[in-house]
Structure formats: structure tokens, C-alpha cells
Amino acid sequence: MLALDSPAVIDASTFVDPELIERRIRHRRILQNIPGWIVKELTEPALAAAAPLRAHPERAAMETHLRDVADRLAGQLRMTLEALTTATMALAAQQLYATAGDQGVEFLQADRERATVEPMAGKYGASGQGFCSLPDLDHDALAALITTTAWADELAGDYRDPRINV
């Protein structure tokens, strides 16, 4: 798989222009900013279902359709995505400081404390009950956004979120 922002063309039958590259990057950042356990729970079964489409001759059109759907869903879920981004960054910071510590640096100590008390991290951190148990979410719309983005990336053939093991 290529880097997140790589402009390479994987298949000559797929027209890759700057607009498509920008859409791919935008959607991949959205997926990256959702806690990994949610992405993993929703995408692994979805990608297995999409496997037969990887060689389909109309996969470029399918990718475009899925990116259109993802754009609409991202607009609808803007506030939820902001909360999930906050949670993901706080969870990542917690993991970083748990591993590397703050090295006694005052600014990092304060940042560590901020990450530790972030309420969104507690709300969207790993749930033993699964994605559907998360409160105050449009579960269907978020699941559709994650699935369409993962499918579009699979059809593009140049990237897969590293948290997904299929």
C-alpha cells in the first residue's frame, strides 16, 4: 500500500486527478480520526464482503459513488466527527505518555494531565459492549460513513487504514 498522500496511479483504467486525490486524503483523515476499535469493528466484515469488487471493471465509478456518499455523511456527522477526533487524539496522547512518560518537562506534564481528563476519551474509549452501545450517536450514519470510506479505499487499491487487518 502507498502512503496516505501518494498521487500514484495504481491502474491505468482509473483516472486519478488532484480532486480525487484530495477526496481520498480527506476521507482517510476522517477514518484516521475515529477511534481504532470502532473502525476495526465495523470495517473488517465490510471489507471481506467487498473483496470480489477489487477486480471489477467499474470499480473507479464505484469508488466515486462511495466518495459522494461519504461526503454527504461527513457533512451530516460533522459534530460527531469533531468529538471522535478529540477522543482519538486524547487516547493517542494517553498511550504516548503511558509509554514514554513526560520526561519531567512541565509543558508535557500539563498536556499529559489534559489528555488524561479529556471527557471524550472516556466516552469513546474502547467499549467492552461494542459500537452500538455508544450513547448519543447516529450509529447507522457513522457505520455507513466508515464502511463507505473503507470500501472506497479498497476499490482505489492504494491504501488501507493500518488498523484494519483483513
Image: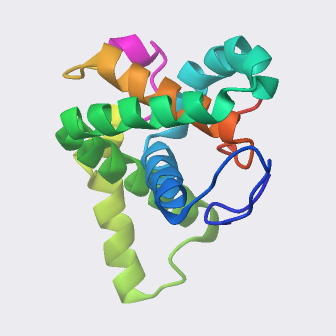
Residue at 70%, 48% (x, y): give it: 159
Q: Main secondary structure of the magenta part?
A: loop
Residue 26 falls left or right of residue 152:
left
**Percent coordinates x, y for residue 152 in the rendering:** 58, 34
Q: Residue at point 57% right, 27% down?
A: 62
The location of residue 157, given as percent across then percent down, is 74, 42
Up/down of 111 relative to 65, above or below: below
Q: Residue 8: x percent and y percent?
A: 74, 63
- Between residue 4 and residue 68, name the one nearer to us: 68
Comparing 163 with 155, the one in front is: 155
Asked whether residue 3 is in view, the answer is yes
Work out whether residue 166 can be spotted: no
For image coordinates 59% across by 24% down, the residue present is 43
- Viewer-proximal residue, 33 or 17? 17
Tell me the quadrant of the picture where the C terminus can be found: top right
Figure quadrant of residue 61: top right
Q: Is residue 9 rendered magenta in the image?
A: no
Q: Is residue 105 left or right of residue 137?
A: right
Q: Is residue 32 above or below residue 136?
A: below
Q: Nearer the viewer, residue 45 or 134?
A: 45
Q: Which residues are magenta?
A: 125-133
Q: Position of residue 118 (x, y in %)?
A: 27, 52
At a point 18% along the width and 41% down the height, the residue shown is 79
